Amino acid sequence: MQKLLEIRDLDLTLDKERILQNINLDVNHGEVLAVIGPNGCGKSSLAYTIMGLKGYEQNGGGIFFKGKEISELSVTERAKKGITLAWQEPARFEGVSVREFLSIGAKAKGRNIDNKDLDWALNEVAIIPNKYLDRNVDDTLSGGERKRIELASILLMKPDLVILDEPDSGVDVVALNNIGDVINDFKNEQMGVILITHSDEMLEVADKAALICGGEIFNVGNPQEVSDYFKYQCIPCEDEDFEKHQGVSSNE
Ligand SMILES: Nc1ncnc2c1ncn2[C@@H]1O[C@H](COP(=O)(O)OP(=O)(O)O)[C@@H](O)[C@H]1O
Ligand SMILES: [Mg+2]
């Protein structure tokens, strides 16, 4: 079966600095790929490069979405093809209500939604619809609430691939379970998910995990094993160069 997303030998240089190097990753329909690694290792940059954000144009390699090379496409064209990014910083739209935010997002994807759909999506992320629908998506909501409302929006948009950049950051523990449930909803819809995360709870919904270190993929495999390696055996990158780490890994 054709892969949903294939990243081949991807390189990204920003300000003459190599940010990503030789990245190879695949995501299938209905599959969750977790991406883990220390702060500053390049996780968000990878998300932005896949999404095609301005200033994150790759310097080498290919990104294939449903079999087609997309690296020349703009962010809007990639979104139209079915890729959505939920930023590390949650959405904030002054003067836009939750109801409008959800409806506009779905409409942009050609989906007409009714009140029942709105209620369903908000309930899925444990947001009480009649308390929140008329509130604004701004600072009057907590970061965690805005993150969950963003996930509700993605549930209504149903893109083929969603990239979630630390959906768990700034979210309380009870809400964490909930985010896991929503990611399972994405899987059930046969969406592919790239899940950038620091949390073990989130890793439970992942089918595989990739550890990025200094802009390179260190290993890919069983989420628990990759996470355990990162937590217990990884040597801080400032102290050692990457080749030495690879030596450690291959001796495992
Ligand atoms: N627009 C940019 N210009 C220059 N350097 C950048 C830019 N964006 C990110 N970087 C650098 O790329 C590296 C990876 O950052 P980032 O992708 O945000 O890491 P992570 O999300 O894993 O914490 C960091 O050293 C960061 O300073
Ligand atoms: Mg980041």
Image (tube, helix red, strand yellow):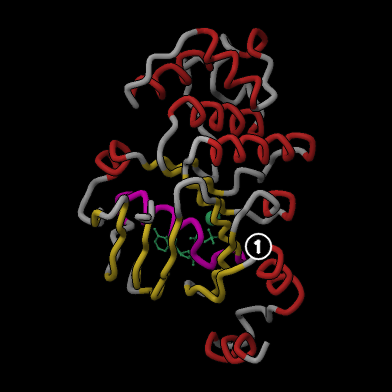
Residue that carries the numbered disc 1 in the rendered image? 223
Magenta span: 37-55
Q: Is residue 205 visible?
A: yes
Question: In the figure, is residue 218 to the left or right of 173?
Answer: left
250 inside magenta stretch: no
* Numbered-mark total: 1
Q: Residue 213, how many percent across, how many down?
A: 55, 73
Determine whether the beta carbon of the residue marked 1 sits less than 8 angstroms from the nearest atom of ligand 1: no
Position of the C terminus, as image quadrant, is: bottom right
Residue 64 location, quadrant:
bottom left
Residue 229 location, quadrant:
bottom right
| Furthest-front residue in this view | 1
Q: Residue 179, how many percent across, how many down?
A: 66, 37
Relative height, residue 105 to residue 49 (above, below): above
Position of the N terminus, as image quadrant, is: bottom left
Residue occupying the point 50% across, 73% down: 217
**Element type where label 1 sits in the image:** helix
Relative height, residue 77 to residue 197 (above, below): above
Judging depth in this view, the residue of 165 and 200 nearest the camera is 200
Residue type marked 1? Pro
Q: Is residue 163 visible?
A: no
Residue occupying the point 64% across, 89% down: 248
Q: Residue 56, how many percent across, how many down?
A: 33, 57
Residue occupying the point 44% across, 32% down: 158
Relative height, residue 188 to residue 198 (above, below): above
Residue occupying the point 55% across, 88% down: 241
Question: In the figure, is residue 126 to the left or right of 12?
Answer: right
Q: Residue 67, how many percent across, how many down?
A: 28, 55
Question: In the figure, is residue 233 to the left or right of 109?
Answer: right
